[in-house]
Amino acid sequence: MKKENLFYLTGSSIENKSVLLLDDVYTTGTTLHQAAAVLYEAGAKKVNSITLAR
C-alpha cells in the first residue's frame, strides 16, 4: 500500500544542490523516502540522510 506524500516545497530553489535530511528515528523509512522524492522532483542533485536511532 502506497501512502500519500504529505511533503511539499515552497520558497527557495534547491535545483542542483545537495540536501541532508536529519531524522530522529528510522522505522519504515517512509518519511525519508517521501521527503527525498519531493526534493528530487524539485531538482536536487543529491539527497542524503542521517538517522539518530533505529
Image (cartoon, rainbow, N blue to C red):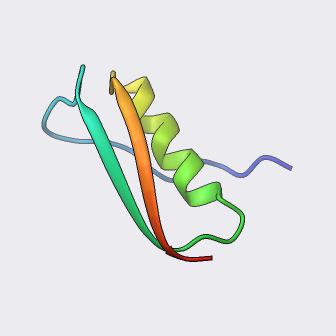
Q: Which quadrant of the structure image shows residue 45?
A: top left
Q: Position of residue 53 (x, y in %)?
A: 54, 79
| Left or right of residue 7: residue 3 | right
Q: Residue at x 53, y 54 (%)?
A: 32
Residue 14 in the image: x percent, y percent?
22, 30
The quarter of the rendered structure image containing the C terminus is: bottom right
Farthest right residue? 1
Give the side of residue 26 with respect to residue 36, left or right. Answer: right
Residue at screen point 60% across, 70% down: 26
Q: Which residue is at the front of the view, 43 or 7?
A: 43
In the image, residue 48 sits, relative to residue 50, either above or below, namely: above
Residue 3: image location, x then y, percent: 72, 52
Q: Residue at x 23, y 28 (%)?
A: 17
Q: Is residue 37 above or below residue 23?
A: above
Q: Position of residue 34 (x, y in %)?
A: 56, 47
Which image quadrant for residue 31?
bottom right
**Measured along the vertical axis of the image, is residue 54 above or below residue 32?**
below
Specify whether 6 is left or right of 50.
right
Residue at left offset 58%, top offset 47%: 33
Task: Please state which of residues 13 and 24 is positioned toward the viewer in this rendering.
Answer: 24
Report the number of numbered marks. 0
